[in-house]
Image: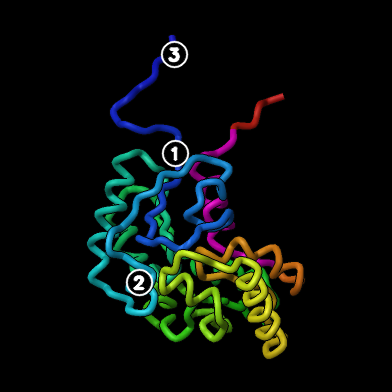
């Protein structure tokens, strides 16, 4: 006899996502667009954690809110938890210690792994939404400081960073795509030893394919990381032939 066990309200979600409070457009590919994923995810919005407060201000007082959110997602039955902003890498150790399921706060956690894939003479290129704020507290928390890397930001361009961090309601997608490509190509021109790119920002995956087409490099982001973790916590069963 097969039996089903309840005890919670929602079922079928393996990945929980702590999302920032925002109103900017979340197009397909963005972490906050549910159609980005080929599997169910469970979102929880962290109130008052706006893009500006998390990225530009780096307010550590938000930690308690993110821990509470992670614990609530765990109670709802998720098998792993991520966040809607790569700058939350600064909370990686505290959040991972607060729950009993894996926590991966930032796509930057892939940087040490990506470096191991490259020649020793190569570096990992990091594209961030705001390089002025991406600091030691973020990098050291996820091991980025231990590997050769180059960081460039999109804050010098006109559209993408402004719309996301100022939480505007309209986004020029084509202009944002062109900006990301421009920044990536400039990084490679100035640093030809970059062997792969990691996109810090969880709003950048919609442009990853275009960046790869223009640069020819492997592109890692929160999309690649979430999919990897999902495959780890919701393993496919292979039939014995």
Q: Is residue 17 left or right of residue 196?
A: left
Q: Which residues are magenta?
A: 218-236
Name the quadrant of the C terminus: top right
**Residue 58 spot, x, y in % from top left:** 33, 76
Q: Is residue 64 left or right of residue 205?
A: left
Taking the image as drawn, is residue 121 in sight? no
- Between the C-alphas of marks 1 and 2, the distance is 26 Å
Tell me which numbered mark, 3 or 1, is placed earlier along the sequence. 3
Name the quadrant of the N terminus: top left
Q: What is the secondary structure assignment of the residue under circle 2?
A: helix
Question: Of the numbered discs in the image, which one, if any, rests on residue 2?
Answer: 3
Q: What is the secondary structure assignment of the residue under circle 1?
A: loop
Q: Residue at x 43, y 59 (%)?
A: 104
Tell me which numbered mark, 2 or 3, is placed earlier along the sequence. 3
Q: Is the residue 39 above or below the residue 176 in the image? A: above
| Quarter of the view holding residue 223 | bottom right
Q: Residue at x 23, y 70 (%)?
A: 61
- The nearer-to-camera label among 2 and 3 is 2
23 vs 107, nearest the viewer: 23
**Residue 29 spot, x, y in % from top left:** 58, 56
Which residue is the extreme one toward the top?
1
207 vs 140, nearest the viewer: 207
- Between the C-alphas of marks 2 and 3, the distance is 47 Å
Asked if residue 232 is among those painted magenta in the image, a careful observer would answer yes
**Residue 131 spot, x, y in % from top left:** 48, 83
- For label 3, count other residues whose C-alpha is less than 10 Å away and answer few (under 14), some (14-19) or many (20+): few
Question: Of the numbered discs in the image, which one, if any, rests on residue 54?
Answer: 2
| Quarter of the view holding residue 225 | bottom right
Residue highlighted by disc 1: 13
């Amino acid at each position: 006899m097969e039996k089903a066990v309840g005890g919670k309200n929602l079922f079928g979600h393996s990945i929980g996502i702590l999302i920032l409070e925002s109103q900017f457009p979340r197009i397909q590919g963005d972490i906050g667009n549910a159609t980005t994923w080929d599997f169910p995810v469970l979102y929880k919005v962290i109130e008052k954690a706006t893009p500006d407060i998390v990225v530009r201000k780096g307010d550590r007082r938000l930690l308690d809110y993110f821990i509470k959110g992670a614990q609530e997602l765990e109670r709802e039955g998720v098998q792993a938890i991520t966040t809607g902003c790569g700058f939350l890498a600064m909370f990686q150790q505290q959040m991972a210690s607060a729950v009993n399921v894996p926590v991966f706060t930032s796509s930057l956690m892939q940087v040490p792994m990506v470096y191991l894939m490259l020649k020793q003479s190569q570096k990992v290129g990091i594209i961030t939404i705001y390089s002025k704020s991406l600091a030691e507290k973020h990098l050291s928390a996820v091991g980025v400081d231990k590997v050769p890397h180059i960081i460039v930001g999109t804050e010098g361009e006109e559209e993408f960073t402004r719309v996301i961090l100022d939480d505007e309601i309209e986004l020029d997608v084509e202009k944002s795509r062109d900006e990301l490509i421009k920044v990536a190509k400039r990084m490679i021109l100035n640093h030809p030893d970059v062997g792969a790119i990691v996109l810090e920002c969880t709003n950048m995956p919609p442009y990853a394919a275009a960046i790869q087409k223009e640069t020819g490099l492997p592109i890692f982001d929160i999309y690649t990381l979430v999919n990897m973790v999902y495959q780890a916590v919701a393993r496919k069963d292979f039939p014995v032939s």
